[in-house]
């Protein structure tokens, strides 16, 4: 028995056999299956009063970026906005996979949510996915008036690989577009794969060190993972304290049985050392994306409630 199972939250045991096996080697087959499942789940969700529109943004680009825009019913004053960057190890994932939660975020926070379907690796390695995220953010800032959005209340919201993109985007646009907050959930931050949790967890559910190795190889393309040429907006965990000064406030959530746990904690510590207001929460007994696998578990409910609370506070939303 793997040692991590002794630490697993008992409420999560019954979902282990139903979890998908991540295969980024045969990534085309895995991606196709994952996309189909995400589309089926999205189609079954009731949008309610939230207006949802798929649109291409960034008309000045040769390749406009696909986004899904969520808008609550019109109300008085300007509302906040969230740029959502989905997970999927840079290889898979989509707005469909995040659709249900993005509806909840829009509804609970009375916020416009822009979910970015950035180009995926290995066909489109770094910097293409990050470029797409930047294009979507720039479009949102430029369209804020038309969307009824307060351009000073735009948060970046990244999950897993999306956490890497959110952190990298915050670094890239610092002093320019200036999002007000960065919510980093289980962020992938360091291609060197040298933390204790990354070395320890080679067979954990959903994410493991072997999966991480393939994910980074796909994302970095011609850049060798672990080499000194990898830039900090690709792997924010490589940043120095000086590189992080002046970034927007952050919240970092990590799962205790996730190989990414320690690099997320290390990134939060570096943000704090750089003078960035940061809050970090380590959820014990949970594996990568456990809150998606079993949202009814107590640890998942705590994470999901805290996500809303943290974003509400950051965006100045009264609840």
Image (cartoon, rainbow, N blue to C red):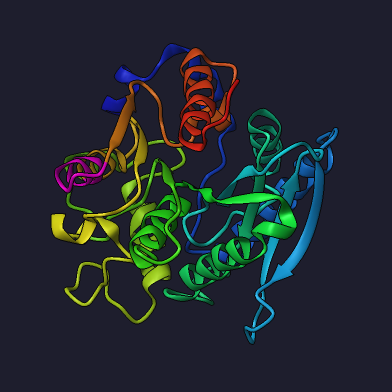
Q: Quadrant of the N terminus?
A: top left
In the rendering, at what x and y percent does residue 162 appear? 48, 53
Q: Position of residue 190 (x, y in %)?
A: 26, 56
- Kindly identify the residue that appears in the image at 34 percent across and 22 percent down: 5
**Is residue 268 inside the magenta stretch?**
yes
Left or right: 97 as drawn, with respect to 308: right
Q: Is residue 278 left or right of residue 52?
A: left
Q: Give the vertical position of 110 relative to 182 (above or below).
A: above
Quadrant position of residue 63: bottom right
Residue nearest the observer in this picture, 261 or 151: 151
Count of numbered circles on the image = 0
57 magenta-colored: no
Closest to the observer: 275 or 106?
275
Judge by depth and name the residue closer to the eye, 2 or 259.
259
Residue at screen point 42% across, 45% down: 181
x 31%, y 27%: residue: 282
> Which residue is farthest bottom?
62
Camera sees residue 256: no
**Quarter of the figure with residue 138:** bottom right
Residue 253, how many percent across, how many down? 37, 34
Can you tell which quarter of the image residue 296 is in? top right
Percent x, y for residue 28? 60, 66
Left or right, 57 with respect to 265, comes to: right
Nearest to the observer: residue 44 or residue 47: 47
Q: Is residue 188 left or right of residue 85?
A: left
Query: Residue at 26% across / 66% down in the picture?
Result: 232
Q: State the quadrant of the C terminus.
A: top right
Please state the extent of the stretch shown in magenta in the rendering: 267-276
The vertical placement of 101 against 37, above or below, is above
Kindly report the secondary structure that dominates the magenta region of the rendered protein: helix
Asked whether the viewer can see residue 32, the reply is yes
**Extreme residue in the front direction:** 77
């Amino acid at each position: 028995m793997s040692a991590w199972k002794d630490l697993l939250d008992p409420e999560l045991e019954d979902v282990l056999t139903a979890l998908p096996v991540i295969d980024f080697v045969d990534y085309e087959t895995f991606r196709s299956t994952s996309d189909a499942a995400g589309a089926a789940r999205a189609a079954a969700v009731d949008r309610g009063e939230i207006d949802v529109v798929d649109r291409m943004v960034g008309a000045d680009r040769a390749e406009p970026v696909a986004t899904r825009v969520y808008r609550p019913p019109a109300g008085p004053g300007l509302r906040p906005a969230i740029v959502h960057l989905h997970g999927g190890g840079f290889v898979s994932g989509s707005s469909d996979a995040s659709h249900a939660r993005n509806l909840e975020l829009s509804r609970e926070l009375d916020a416009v949510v822009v979910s970015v379907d950035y180009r995926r690796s290995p066909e489109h390695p770094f910097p293409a996915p990050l470029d797409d995220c930047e294009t979507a953010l720039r479009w949102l800032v430029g369209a804020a008036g038309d969307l009824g959005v307060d351009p000073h209340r735009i948060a970046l919201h990244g999950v897993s690989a999306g956490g890497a993109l959110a952190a990298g985007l915050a670094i890239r646009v610092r002093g320019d577009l200036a999002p007000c907050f960065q919510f980093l959930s289980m962020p992938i931050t360091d291609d060197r794969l040298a933390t204790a949790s990354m070395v320890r967890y080679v067979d954990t559910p959903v994410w493991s060190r072997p999966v991480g190795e393939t994910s980074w190889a796909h994302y970095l393309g011609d850049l060798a993972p672990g080499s000194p040429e990898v830039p900090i907006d690709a792997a924010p965990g490589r940043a120095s304290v000086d590189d992080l000064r002046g970034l927007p406030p952050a919240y970092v959530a990590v799962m205790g049985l996730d190989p990414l746990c320690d690099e997320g904690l290390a990134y939060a510590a570096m943000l704090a050392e750089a003078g960035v207001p940061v809050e970090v929460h380590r959820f014990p007994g949970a594996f990568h994306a456990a809150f998606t696998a079993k949202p009814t578990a107590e640890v998942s409910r705590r994470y999901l409630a805290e996500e809303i609370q943290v974003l509400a506070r950051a965006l100045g939303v009264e609840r």
